[in-house]
Amino acid sequence: MAKATPEEQLSFGLSLVDLAHRWRRVIDGELRPLGFSQATWRTLFFVSRAGGQIRQKDLAVDIGIEGPSLVHLLDSLEDSGLIRREVSEADRRAKLVNLTNTGKTEMRRIETILNSVRGSLLQDLDKDQLSKCTKIFDVIKTNALAREAQIVAETGGGY
């Protein structure tokens, strides 16, 4: 197997970043008329994927934002009646984020749109192509996680 050249690696990386940007823009464009920004729909998405309840700290990691920014976002979602926060019974220091019934209803609407977007964007790919692509992404993710751990070890903490 021939190793990719640095130029080919650069081209792949730029294509991957461009794809992620365009994928997100299409989803955001579809959800904006419903009143959801990327920050709000992604937050609801990750709470839903966690079974409708997640620790606030874990949610911050999942969506990749700092605690103070998350608190402001959660305040907004709570004011809209989409989530509620409560103290964890198991760990009084932890806050749990829960979808409300309204949040669950909105999440079903969001999921319908996400399914439609995925179907549209992936319509020309077959099962084997998607499987191969997913395996490639998994290798890249594993390498990225190892590199992140190396950076943390070298810097003694975060980035």
Image (cartoon, grey):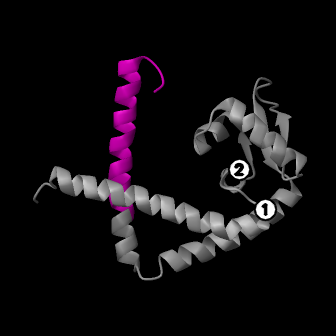
Residue marked by disc 2: 47
State whether residue 153 is above or below residue 142.
Answer: above
Q: Nearer the viewer, residue 128 or 113?
A: 113
Nearer to us in this view, 66 or 94: 66
Q: Is 96 situated left or right of 111 in this image?
A: right
| Residue that protrudes farthest toward the left in the picture | 2
> Could you say whether the residue bearing mark 2 is in a helix, strand or loop?
helix
Q: Check the image and report above or below for 27 versus 123.
A: above
- The residue at 83%/40% (across/down) is 75
| Residue pictured at 78% horizontal, 32% vertical | 95
On residue 35, the disc is 1
- What residue is shown at x 67% (from left), y 72% (from top)? 113
Classified by dominant secondary structure, the portion drawn in magenta counts as helix
Q: Is residue 75 left or right of residue 121?
A: right
Residue 77 image position (x, y, % from top left): 82, 48
In the displayed structure, does residue 3 sit left or right of residue 54?
A: left
Q: Residues within 10 Å of mark 1 (few under 14, many from 20)?
A: few
Vertical arrangement, residue 15 with respect to residue 72, above or below: below
Disc 2 residue type? Val
Q: Which residues are magenta?
A: 134-159
Q: Identify residue type, mark 1.
A: Gly
